[in-house]
Image: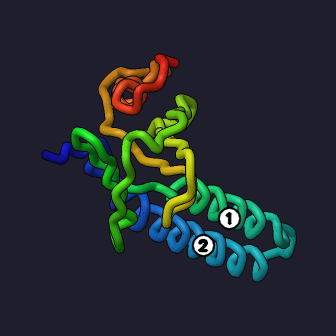
Amino acid sequence: MQRNLSSAQTFFMKLVFPAVWIVLCGSIVLAAHFRESQASPGLGAFPFLIWGIGAFAMLWMCMPLKRVSIDDGNLYVSNYFREIKVPLAAIADVTENRWINIHPVTIHLKRDTEFGNRITFMPKSRMFSGFSSHPVVQELRRAAGLPAG
């Protein structure tokens, strides 16, 4: 039986949040630019540069997120348009980024799949976890027969 490892908010963080952020912040930058340019030109392209960097960062962090579930021998990985099955034996390493509040976990694979050789997902959130390692990292390491990291 499959068990979901990903957060229920993955769909929102992957597809909804970046689109809303980019459109909303872009609208604010455009409105401020036109209002400022009528009063006194001075801001120039700087707000657009900041918005562009923010949009790039948003897409870079959120778009790779996948929905991941597990059973006794496989991972099931979905980008919400298709799903692939990856044997647990194909896992080379499991890492996480503790510095980003969603604690993205990356599964490094021994070979390429339709989604590449890395699968990044947002694990279920934990209250008051701080910068501690998410338990799903060790769970995946054990399931793949990797040493504790």
Residue 74 locus on image (x, y percent): 31, 46
Above or below residue 107? Residue 126 is: above
Residue 46, percent from left and from top: 81, 64
Instruction: Between residue 92 and residue 52, name the one nearer to us.
Output: 92
Q: Is residue 17 above or below residue 108?
A: below
Mark 2 or mark 1, which has the lower sequence index?
2
| Residue at 49% from the left image edge and 42% from the top image edge | 107
Dividing the image into 4 quarters, which one contains the N terminus?
top left
Image-based side of 41 in relation to 106, left or right: right
Position of residue 77 measured from the top left corner of the image (x, y, whole percent): 36, 56
Provide residue 85's location: percent of width, then percent of height: 34, 57
Residue kind at label 2, given as amino acid type: Gly
Residue at 47% across / 40% down in the picture?
91
**Residue at x-position 49% and y-position 50%:** 119
The picture quadrant where one finds residue 139 is top left
> Are dots 2 and 1 in contact, CB under 8 Å?
yes
Residue placed most toward the observer, 82 or 80 = 82
Q: Report the amino acid beneath label 1.
A: Trp
Front residue of 121 and 9? 121
Residue labelled with disc 1: 51
Furthest-left residue in view? 1
Q: Which of 147 and 83 is in front in this view?
A: 147
Badge 2: residue crowd in 10 Å (few <14, some 14–19, many ≥20): some
